[in-house]
């Protein structure tokens, strides 16, 4: 029973809300009135890719987790490295199987998500950090939107623009998310972007990425999104910008306070809702 609980813990169920929401959003961006099957697949396929990636994240991070998170399933030894490889691969295989049933395009985009979600922790494992790793994370998350669009069988220009916005937002998030792990990263010899250029400079980059994403979001009506999305989108992007400004004002604070990542996730989910409002409001 303990092992079963740890296997469930390994995929961090609350974190699967993000890929599920983005995939669902992608379905709506491709089809104004999607059927239930498309919405379910839009939520499940990216979530399976993400679940597998989370397992491989802990597989590659086992040494740093022994220092910072010794209670985690693999670091604690309750789940062996061999079991984690099989477990993570099972999620990937199921993701690719379901996406292959949808279309070759869904399979291809799902494979991109899997590749970048696996490269992301591997770069840390081989001590290759910096902006490249942050960007890998952003691409892995952003492409969950395109997975949903392929399920709707329509990769529109709007969906591509929203994917780019997603990449900017989640690259920024990943930069911020490295702040609390600086001490452990130092011990492991891993050079994250905040360590390479300093907390202040990293905060500036995270802020600029958020601002670019905000401008892109508020311009989506130019790509055909109904204007009804604007009020909710404005609240969402302002929350992201204000949080980034808080980081910019006092980056040292967020070395020990990771609440900003959670609060940004709330803003991002609100942003997804605004896009769905824009699509359905234009029907």
Image (tube, rainbow, N blue to C red):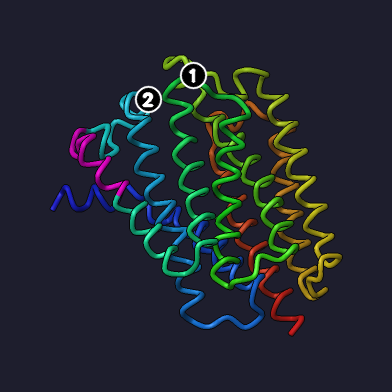
Image quarter for residue 67? top left
Task: Please tell me which residue is depicted at 71% across the width and 59% down the height of the picture.
Answer: 236
Task: Please tell me which residue is depicted at 50% across the width and 76% down the height of the picture.
Answer: 38
User: Where 217 sits versus 86, above or below?
Assistant: below
Q: Residue furthest left?
A: 1
| SS at mark 2 in the image | helix
Q: Which residue is mark 2?
A: 64
Dot 1, how many residues are within 10 Å of its Cα: few (below 14), some (14-19), or many (20+)?
many
User: Where 37 sits versus 127, above or below?
Assistant: below
Visible residue check, residue 56? yes
- Secondary structure character of the magenta stretch overall: helix
| SS at mark 1 in the image | loop
Q: Position of residue 237 (x, y in %)?
A: 74, 55
Dot 2, how many residues are within 10 Å of its Cα: few (below 14), some (14-19), or many (20+)?
many
Q: Position of residue 83 (x, y in %)?
A: 20, 41
> Of 184 and 45, which appears nearest the observer?
45
Q: Which residue is mark 1?
A: 190
Mark earlier in primary sequence (2, 1): 2
Q: Position of residue 100 (x, y in %)?
A: 43, 63
Image quarter for residue 244? top right
Visible residue check, residue 260? no
> Of 13 and 117, which appears nearest the observer?
117
The residue range painted magenta reads 77-89
Mark on residue 66? none
Task: Please tell me which residue is depicted at 70% across the width and 68% down the height of the picture.
Answer: 274
User: Where 275 sits versus 162, above or below?
Assistant: below
Please say if the residues under marks 2 and 1 sit with CB atoms less than 8 Å apart. Answer: yes
Q: Position of residue 232 (x, y in %)?
A: 74, 67
Quadrant showing the C terminus: bottom right
Q: Is residue 96 magenta?
A: no
Is 133 left or right of 85, judged from the image as shown?
Answer: right
> Of 43 and 186, which appears nearest the observer?
43
């Amino acid at each position: 029973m303990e092992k079963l609980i740890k296997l469930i813990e390994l995929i961090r169920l609350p974190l699967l809300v993000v890929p599920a929401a983005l995939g669902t959003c992608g379905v709506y961006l491709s089809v104004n009135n999607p059927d239930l099957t498309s919405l379910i697949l839009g939520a499940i396929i990216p979530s399976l890719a993400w679940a597998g990636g989370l397992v491989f994240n802990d597989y590659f991070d086992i040494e740093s987790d022994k220092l910072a998170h010794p209670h985690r399933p693999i670091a604690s030894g309750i789940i062996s490295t061999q079991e984690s490889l099989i477990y993570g691969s099972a999620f990937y295989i199921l993701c690719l199987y379901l996406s292959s049933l949808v279309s070759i395009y869904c399979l291809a985009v799902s494979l991109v998500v899997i590749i970048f979600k696996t490269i992301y922790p591997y770069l840390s494992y081989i001590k290759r950090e910096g902006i490249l790793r942050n960007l890998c994370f952003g691409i892995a998350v952003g492409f969950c939107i395109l997975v949903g669009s392929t399920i709707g069988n329509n990769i529109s220009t709007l969906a591509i623009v929203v994917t780019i916005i997603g990449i900017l937002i989640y690259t920024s998030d990943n930069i911020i998310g490295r702040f609390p792990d600086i001490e452990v990263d130092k011990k492991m010899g891993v050079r994250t972007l905040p360590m390479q250029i300093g907390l202040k400079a990293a905060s500036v980059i995270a802020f600029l990425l958020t601002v670019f994403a905000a401008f892109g979001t508020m311009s989506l009506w130019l790509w055909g999104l109904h204007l009804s999305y604007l009020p909710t989108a404005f609240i969402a992007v302002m929350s992201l910008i204000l949080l980034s400004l808080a980081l910019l004002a006092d980056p040292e604070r967020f070395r020990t306070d990771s609440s900003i990542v959670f609060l940004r996730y709330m803003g991002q989910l609100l942003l997804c809702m605004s896009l769905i409002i824009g699509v359905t409001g234009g029907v």
